[in-house]
Image (cartoon, rainbow, N blue to C red):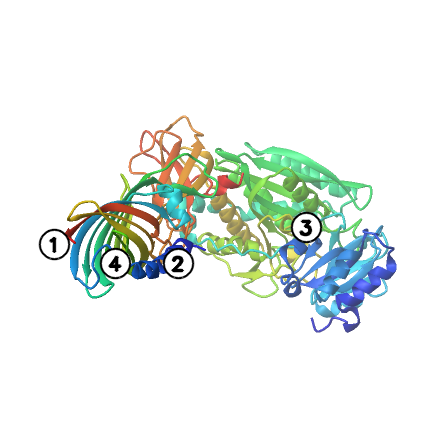
């Protein structure tokens, strides 16, 4: 149940891609290699309740990615994701005092995966899946308490790129990421820093369409 | 164990059937006295244990008053139970403590006997008082089905080391203890025993016993600083007698007390006319009198109570009355040091046996430590929850920590409960040494005050703050001052109750302190000291655990 969002994306992508392939590549021409560079912002709903409790129900990560179309529908994607969030400590059990500390969470993720492209009208639709390597640090502000770690994770998603100018596409995607840290605190023994995320951005496609 | 009759040990299935046959449907009256081995009890769920009506804990078993439903439940859970008696209403039950396992045979013919363990039997003869039936050689404890003690797995508190005792006392306070010890007078002890012996008998229910009580009252009343009172009670039906209670109020925490006690009544084979009871227990009483004389001139953080119990020989009536009352009043007792028979030396270089139950183990360890440091004498600590034949036992029943100091747990004194138990048979050097060791422990626990008294009312509340990956405990402390001379305070923290470190950087001027960023998974213990303008520091306050205030 925790990863329901990821499975939904996978199912949607699986349903959409064959139709796109049958539609005859009205968008990007199949088989032609291309390279694109994009960036955007996301709205993420953390999968872990502990993250939501401490940092709010949504967070706003930033993304940058480089996509390389290879042969046929297949391509590669590498990217970087940055999540910065502010929160406040929580009391375990009934609080006896209103004492609390501001928190700061920083997650830097390097990502790489495969991308499966198709077209739907002028738009390009795609599914992607890959792995991530995540560097995270949580700090209690104005104290010496902090915790940092590194952990591998996974992501999968689906989206579309809609051409708006010769070299530019609007990029939208929905993805689900898992970042199981294996560590935890008083609210969760094993925190997952991933979640369900909608990303919107712009893509510059080198060489145009 | 090997001596227990197999016929009495039947599984609870039979017990349940028997109880069912004895009662009608829906009859929930408690009607069977049973004995269940602790090893069998501890497999029961906590909610079942909580419903059991414990009458007496022994070393390996519990005596329980069980309803027919409970018997059936035990049977259903295949918990073996030995039925000791059915229909207990109107019966006067006694534990009888044997001088040897073979002595149980001497009880046959006087009434009903059930062997509980090697040294302890359950005895009754209808509603009659055992003291009036049995020969004087048998030590007694009255059991009351009205008592209800929780049947819980006993906790074993960690022994408190001498090092810990040191850290809680300021050095100058600790240095007072040898001075106290040196003031114990063998001549006074001898005189005290002689004076008590001179009443000819102190058998409870006689006028002479009451005269002895008055004598003790006057002794304590003559000592400055003591608040002395009678504590009258009924025993064995309509008989009356009195405990004598003398209190030296604590300077900072008067509501926490250390009890030094002994029973002053006696018995013998001619109890109403000739029961000198020099060893049993003028010796212990004399020690309490002398310790009170020495310590009443000094100030302590915690209260010291000097108590002489009556009607011990009838079944521990006086101490039971007092312990019940203390529990009902919510009294905080740090520890009870009971001295019973501390004068007869059957072999040269007699040792003092320190009897404790598992929960009081730490107190026994402290006694041994005090004896070693202040009054060298051979000591032997014995952990035995079945050793119930003296006034420490009702305190155990009520959940207090108590020890019994006795010359030999096996009671080899040939004059025991005889008219020959006189001063001339005692080794007064031994009495003096035991008195000194007991005084040292009592003083150590009550904490002598040298400069200013320790703060009082220390409370602690803690909460754990958490983030995704880190936890930190915060402890909120507050206390109150007990001395006008206090200009500041220090807070001491420990995770093991032995090594304390100062938690505050600079001297605190407020009576609150918040200790932050502690390990969430650790328990912390705190004590506070007061500091005067000359920098002199008080002893530690009463210690609290970090979450003690959370439970209130």
Query: For the residue labelled by badge 4, is the local secondary structure a helix, a strand or a loop?
Result: loop
The foreground one among B183 and A173 is A173
Residue found at the far left of this picture: A207
Which of the numbered marks, if any, corresponds to residue B149?
A: 3
The answer to whether marks 3 and 1 sit on the same chain is: no
Going from N to C along the chain, the mark reached first, 4 or 2, is: 2
> In whole angstroms, how far apart are the C-alphas of marks 4 and 2?
21 Å
Q: Are marks 1 and 2 on the same chain?
A: yes
Spatial CA span between label 1 and label 2: 32 Å
Q: Position of residue A99 (x, y in %)?
A: 38, 35
Q: Chain of mark 1?
A: A
Q: Nearer the viewer, mark 2 or mark 3?
A: 2
Location of residue B114 with respect to B25 vertically, above or below = below
The span from disc 4 to disc 3 (Cα, nearest Å) is 84 Å
Number of callouts: 4
As helix, strand or loop, the secondary structure at mark 2 comes to helix
Q: Are marks 4 and 3 on the same chain?
A: no
Distance (Cα) linking label 3 and label 1: 88 Å
Nearer the viewer's eye, disc 4 or disc 1?
A: 4
Whether residue B175 appears in this view of the structure is no
Residue A207's label in the rendered image is: 1
Q: Please name which of the two marks, 4 or 2, marks the residue nearer to the observer.
A: 4
| Element type where label 1 sits in the image | loop
Tell me whether marks 4 and 1 sit on the same chain.
yes
- Give residue A25's mark: 4
Residue B143 in picture, x, y percent from top left: 75, 52
Image quadrant containing the N terminus of chain B = bottom right
Mark 2 packing: few (<14 Cα in 10 Å), some, or many (20+)?
Answer: few
Q: Nearer the viewer, mark 1 or mark 2?
A: 1
Q: Which residue is mark 2?
A: A11
Please provide percent x and percent y for residue B450: 41, 36
- Quadrant that contains the C terminus of chain B: top right
């Amino acid at each position: 149940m925790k990863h329901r969002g990821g499975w939904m994306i996978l199912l949607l992508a699986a349903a959409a891609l064959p139709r796109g392939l049958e539609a005859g590549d009205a968008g990007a021409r199949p088989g032609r290699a291309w390279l694109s560079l994009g960036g955007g912002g996301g709205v993420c709903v953390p999968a872990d309740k502990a993250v939501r409790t401490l940092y709010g129900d949504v967070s706003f990560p930033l993304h940058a990615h480089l996509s390389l179309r290879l042969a046929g529908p297949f391509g590669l994607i590498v990217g970087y994701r940055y999540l910065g969030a502010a929160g406040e400590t929580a009391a375990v059990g009934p609080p006896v005092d209103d004492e609390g500390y501001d928190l700061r969470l920083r997650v830097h993720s390097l990502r790489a995966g495969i991308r499966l492209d198709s077209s739907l009208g002028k738009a390009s639709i795609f599914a992607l899946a890959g792995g991530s390597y995540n560097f995270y640090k949580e700090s209690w502000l104005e104290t010496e308490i902090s915790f940092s770690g590194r952990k591998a994770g996974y992501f999968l998603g689906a989206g579309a790129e809609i051409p708006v100018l010769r070299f530019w596409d609007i990029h939208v995607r929905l993805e689900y990421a898992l970042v199981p840290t294996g560590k935890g605190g008083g609210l969760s023994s094993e925190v997952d820093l991933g979640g369900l995320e909608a990303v919107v951005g712009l893509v510059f496609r080198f060489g145009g369409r | 164990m090997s001596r227990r009759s197999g016929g009495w040990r039947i599984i609870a299935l039979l017990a349940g059937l028997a109880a069912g046959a004895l009662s009608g449907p829906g009859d929930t009256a408690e009607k069977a006295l049973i004995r269940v081995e602790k090893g069998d009890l501890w497999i029961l769920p906590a909610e079942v244990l909580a419903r059991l009506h414990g009458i007496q804990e022994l070393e390996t078993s519990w005596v329980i008053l069980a309803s027919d439903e409970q018997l059936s439940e035990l049977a259903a859970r295949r918990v073996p139970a030995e039925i000791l008696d059915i229909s207990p209403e109107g019966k006067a039950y006694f534990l009888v403590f044997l001088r040897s396992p073979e002595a149980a045979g001497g009880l046959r013919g006087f009434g009903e006997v059930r062997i509980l363990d090697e040294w302890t039997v359950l005895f009754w003869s209808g509603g009659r008082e055992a003291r009036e039936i049995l020969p004087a050689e048998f030590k007694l404890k009255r059991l009351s089905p009205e008592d209800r003690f929780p049947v819980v797995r006993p906790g074993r508190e960690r022994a408190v080391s001498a090092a810990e005792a040191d850290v809680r006392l300021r050095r100058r306070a600790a240095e007072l203890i040898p001075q106290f010890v040196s003031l114990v007078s063998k001549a006074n002890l001898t005189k005290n025993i002689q004076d008590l012996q001179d009443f000819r008998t102190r058998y409870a229910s006689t006028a002479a016993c009451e005269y002895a009580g008055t004598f003790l009252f006057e002794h304590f009343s003559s000592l400055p600083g003591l608040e002395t009172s009678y504590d009258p009670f009924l025993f064995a039906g309509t008989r009356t007698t009195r405990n004598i209670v003398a209190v030296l109020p604590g300077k900072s925490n008067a509501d926490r007390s250390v009890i030094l006690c002994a029973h002053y009544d006696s018995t013998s084979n001619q109890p109403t006319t000739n029961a000198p009871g020099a060893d049993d227990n003028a010796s212990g009483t004399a020690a309490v009198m002398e310790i009170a004389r020495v310590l009443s001139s000094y100030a302590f953080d915690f209260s010291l109570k000097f108590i002489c119990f009556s009607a011990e020989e009838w079944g521990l009536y006086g101490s039971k009355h007092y312990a019940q009352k203390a529990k009902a009043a919510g009294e905080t007792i740090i520890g009870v040091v009971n001295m019973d028979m501390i004068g007869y030396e059957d072999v040269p270089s007699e040792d003092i046996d320190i009897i404790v139950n598992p929960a009081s183990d730490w107190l026994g360890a402290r006694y041994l430590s005090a004896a070693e440091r202040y009054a060298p004498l051979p000591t032997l600590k014995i952990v035995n929850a079945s050793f119930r034949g003296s006034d420490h036992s009702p305190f155990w029943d009520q959940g207090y920590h108590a020890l019994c100091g006795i010359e030999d747990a096996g009671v080899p004194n040939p004059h025991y409960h005889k008219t020959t138990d006189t001063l001339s048979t005692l080794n007064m050097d031994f009495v003096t040494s035991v008195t000194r060791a007991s005084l040292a422990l009592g003083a150590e626990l009550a904490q002598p005050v040298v400069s200013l008294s320790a703060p009082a009312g220390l409370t602690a509340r803690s909460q754990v703050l958490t983030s995704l990956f880190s936890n930190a405990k915060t402890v909120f402390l507050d206390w109150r001052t007990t001395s006008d001379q206090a200009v500041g305070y220090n807070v001491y923290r420990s995770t093991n109750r032995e090594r304390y470190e100062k938690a505050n950087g600079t001297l605190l001027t407020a009576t609150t302190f918040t200790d932050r960023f502690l390990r969430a998974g650790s328990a912390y213990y705190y004590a506070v000291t007061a500091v005067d303008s000359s920098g002199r520091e008080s002893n530690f306050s009463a210690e609290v655990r970090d979450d003690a205030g959370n439970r209130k």
